[in-house]
Image: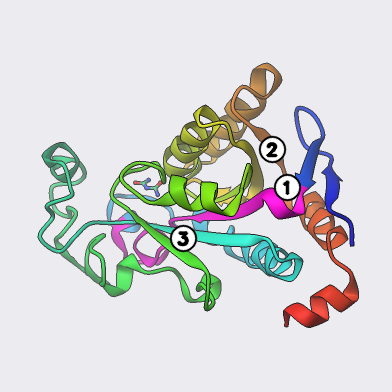
Amino acid sequence: MSATAEIPAEPSPFTLAADRTALIVIDMQRDFLLPGGFGESLGNDVDQLARVVPPLAALIGAARDAGVMVIHTREGHRPDLSDCPPAKLRRGAPSKRIGDEGKYGRILIRGEYGHDIVDELAPVAGEVVIDKPGKGAFYATELSELLTAAGITQLLVTGVTTEVCVHTTTREANDRGYECLVVSDCVGSYFPEFQRVGLEMIKAQGGIFGWVADSAVVIPALTQLTTPADREEAR
Ligand code: C5J
């Protein structure tokens, strides 16, 4: 077993350290991804997000096999909306707002069907799920303490949407000193242009707040961190 693996990322190679890395899966929730859900009610093309699911499922599987910590997040609020700022509540299409009844229950409310993670990417026993009221995963959550306690210094960042919660979380993490590699085909935007530019922004200027690589190179690096015996043991 090797403790590190080199990923041919942009703008420069990224050295993945097995025991210091966590995979963070941001907001792969039914409300954002499923037809008829909140995301679609805002006029978005949910097919743009659906394409993230297969490569992300493979990446999560590789991280689990490598013993890399997997952390899931969900954007949402308490049923009484006490943690939802009025400015956020007022935003969006007037027909459908956070807390309103939607196709999958009350929109972005904890405990509702739509608030939970899509079946294909469901957390397994022992994986942490962080409920966050904001776009960034560090704001008003226990994420920072969790990562510090686990000795994590690198994040593989995935999920939706690229230009909103993925960017906000990556920027927050970068400012806190984490090395962030955003996995390009495992993040998604409703807007192809935002996807393209969102990824460009991360790796521009010498990697101004992160690295970018696709799962075709990240998965083999994760696999390199394990031996077949390790993988067998992890099952
Ligand atoms: C948005 C998110 N776009 N998870 N949330 O409102 O990116």
Mark 1 neighbour density, 10 Å: few (under 14) some (14–19) many (20 or more)? some
State the mark number for residue 212: 2
**Looking at the picture, how far across and down is residue 188, in whole percent?**
53, 49
* Residue 20, magenta (yes or no): yes
Q: Where does label 3 land, which residue?
A: 28
- Considering only vertical position in the picture, is 32 above or below 117? above
Q: Left or right: where does residue 165 sit relative to residue 185?
A: left
State the mark number for residue 42: none
| Amino acid type for the residue under numbered disc 1 | Asp
Q: Where does label 1 land, which residue?
A: 214
**Looking at the picture, how far across and down is residue 1, in whole percent?**
89, 62
Q: Which residues are magenta?
A: 17-38
In this orientation, which residue lies closer to the viewer: 50 or 176?
A: 176
Quadrant that contains the C terminus: bottom right
Q: Left or right: where does residue 131 sit relative to residue 95?
A: right
In this orientation, which residue lies closer to the viewer: 181 or 150?
A: 150
| Amino acid type for the residue under numbered disc 3 | Met
Residue at 36% from the left image edge and 43% from the top image edge:
135
The image quadrant of residue 182 is top right
Q: CA distance from mark 2 to mark 3?
A: 19 Å
* Residue 26, magenta (yes or no): yes
